[in-house]
């Protein structure tokens, strides 16, 4: 017997888990290190245009993480998170091996891959995107039948 709600539950769990980790990292960039400290850190790692990269990373992680938790703008946010993690992978972590405690790529690879899957599959039924889509579909149907 097939349980259609299991996919939606799995996507919800993935969105919340990935989003929570991103929120923590984005908040750290804004409130613990500050944007100035994050810029300095990025510059020290040799990241090009560290001012733009730091602001992009902080916003994508904090705001994008919250959007993933809610399931809002999931395809766009998933791609932005994936691009952010790809940059971190290539520019910082790839040469350090796998393990995060050695500066490795495991966290950014897992977050990037998870975000890409969410971008491709969508947020599931328990999401803002789904609610907005249902509302728009109902309004279009009502407008069409009234015409």
Image (cartoon, rainbow, N blue to C red):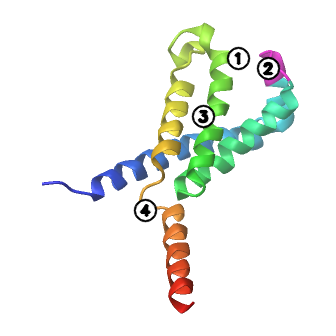
Spatial CA span between label 4 and label 1? 35 Å
Mark earlier in primary sequence (3, 1): 3
Task: Name the residue beneath numbered marker 3.
Answer: 82
Task: Name the residue beneath numbered marker 1.
Answer: 91
Q: Nearer the viewer, residue 142 or 46?
A: 142
Q: Considering only vertical position in the picture, is 116 above or below 3?
A: above
The image position of residue 119, as x and y in percent, is 53, 44
Residue drawn at point x = 54 percent, y = 46 percent: 20
Mark earlier in primary sequence (3, 2): 2
- Quarter location, residue 143: bottom right
Spatial CA span between label 2 and label 4? 37 Å
The image position of residue 50, as x and y in percent, is 84, 26
Mark earlier in primary sequence (1, 2): 2
Q: Is residue 73 magenta?
A: no
Spatial CA span between label 1 and label 2? 6 Å
Mark earlier in primary sequence (4, 1): 1
Q: Which mark is residue 47?
A: 2
The image position of residue 140, as x and y in percent, is 55, 78
Element type at marker 4?
loop
């Amino acid at each position: 017997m097939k349980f259609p709600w299991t996919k939606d539950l799995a996507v919800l769990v993935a969105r919340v888990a990935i989003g929570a980790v991103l929120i923590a990292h984005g908040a750290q960039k804004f409130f613990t290190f500050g944007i100035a400290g994050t810029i300095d850190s990025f510059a020290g790692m040799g990241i090009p245009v560290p001012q733009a990269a730091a602001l992009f990373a902080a916003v994508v992680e904090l705001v994008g993480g919250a959007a993933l938790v809610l399931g809002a703008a999931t395809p766009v946010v998933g791609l932005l998170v994936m691009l952010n993690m790809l940059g971190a992978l290539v520019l910082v972590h790839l040469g350090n091996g796998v393990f995060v405690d050695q500066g490795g790529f495991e966290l950014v690879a897992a977050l990037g891959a998870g975000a890409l899957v969410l971008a491709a599959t969508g947020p599931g039924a328990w999401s803002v995107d789904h609610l907005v889509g249902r509302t728009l579909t109902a309004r279009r149907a009502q407008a069409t039948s009234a015409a």
